[in-house]
Image (cartoon, rainbow, N blue to C red):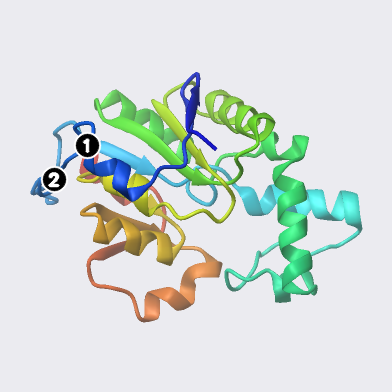
Amino acid sequence: MSGHTVGRITCAPIKVADLQTGGLLFGDPPVINFERENRNMHFILDCDGVLLDWTRGFRHWVFANHGIKPSASGPRTWSLFNWLGLPEERCFELIQQFNASQAFGELYPIDGAKEAVAKLKAAGHKLTVLTSCSDDPVALRRRKDNLDREFDGALDRVICLALRESKTAWLEVLRGGIWIEDNYKNAMMGVNAGHKTFMLRHRHNAEDERTTDSRIQWVDNWRPIVSLFS
């Protein structure tokens, strides 16, 4: 499948070899003073769990459509096996169904995310969303419309990858920025690509913090990030 752009949505599977041609060669990432940083920076943002509350939307959808009522407190780990009480394969099928549904385009923002994005935008920072949710054009349009609606068009670019597709190649392309995630594996991809990386704490990633890489900065919410960069 060849990459393509629809509006500000990029649906672009890329090969690492492609990153070495066409001027896409990058030097070392810039050194950033994190005591207080006011220069215009490039923020690369995960979407689900960072900008939009996917867990809340999925919980309501799975109850309305399948009669499954998982705990409102959310899953304890990245696996939904215990939260839903279903085999892993069935959990993944339900995730795929939800991401293909109308409800996927009607998610609420994470607490504090809307205000944070507005402040970062007002401070002159560039904001890119990098999400592995779907490569279906209808789902991508729903995602973009959802983000535009909830964040008042403040996000400069939305890059959508297939569900579970690695973000490594795009993080290499976008290197030298501020990477905000809630998935530890993806956070480490950002660290290895030269990004200053923040992890938003959630119930599902609590175990990861116990053995975290020291280069990742963990925060309870958006407020510490906004205080540094706006």
Residue 59, compared with residue 129, is above or below; it is below
- Tell me how far mark 1 sits from mark 2, CA to CA: 30 Å
Q: Which residue is tagged 2?
A: 36
Residue 142 at least partly seen: yes
Label 1 residue SS = loop
Residue 63, compared with residue 178, is above or below; it is below
> Position of 76 compared to 116: left or right?
right
Label 2 residue SS = loop
In percent of width and height, residue 156 lies at 39, 25
Q: Which residue is tagged 1?
A: 24
Residue 157, compared with residue 21, is above or below; it is above
Residue 174 at least partly seen: no
Residue at horizontal 20 percent and vertical 54 percent from the top = 194
The reply to whether dot 1 and dot 2 touch (C-beta < 8 Å) is no
Nearest the viewer among 49 and 91 is 91
Q: Check the image and name the residue furthest to the bottom.
A: 211
